[in-house]
Amino acid sequence: MNEFILINLNPNINLYFFLTFFIGLIGIVINKNNLLMFLICIEILLFSVNILFIIISFKNNDIMGQIFVFIILTIAAAEASIILAIIILTFKIKGNIDLNKLNFIKG
């Protein structure tokens, strides 16, 4: 029996996407000086994009959106580990992680 299970999605789930996206966007704009909060806001943005891909995947009955979610999660994990390593090294060298005082990262 090959039957598709119809998932009744909440019609307000797009509101959740927009809400998390704008929370992350506002957090990036507000927290320009705090590197750790900046990283958390980027992760919130990536989470909201994952929600959108899952919504589109379920509505179109396609698995490609879920595959993109796994790819985005892998990239987000790699990005978070690299940025946390930079934060730790910066704190060891300079003694703080204030973005206004960091000028040795500039190219």
Image (cartoon, rainbow, N blue to C red):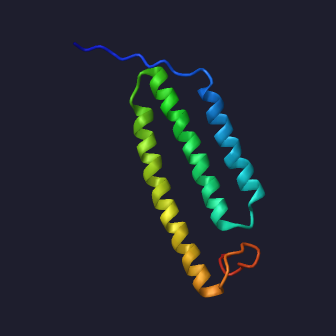
Q: Nearer the viewer, residue 74 or 12?
A: 12
Which quadrant of the figure has residue 35? bottom right
Q: Residue at x 76, y 74 (%)?
A: 100
105, above or below 17, in the image: below
Q: Residue at x 72, y 53 (%)?
A: 27
Q: Is residue 3 left or right of residue 61?
A: left
3, above or below 47, in the image: above
Q: Residue at x 51, y 28 (%)?
A: 55
Question: Residue 90: horizontal and vertical position, in percent?
Answer: 60, 80
Seen from this angle, which residue lies furthest left? Answer: 1
62, above or below 68, in the image: above
Question: Residue 89: horizontal and vertical position, in percent?
Answer: 55, 80
Question: Residue 4: horizontal and vertical position, in percent?
Answer: 34, 16
Q: Nearer the viewer, residue 67 or 12?
A: 12
For the C terminus, the quadrant is bottom right
Q: Is residue 103 left or right of residue 62?
A: right
For the N terminus, the quadrant is top left
How many numbered discs, if any? 0
Q: Residue at x 45, y 33 (%)?
A: 65
Which quadrant of the figure has residue 39? bottom right
Question: Residue 33: horizontal and vertical position, in percent?
Answer: 74, 67
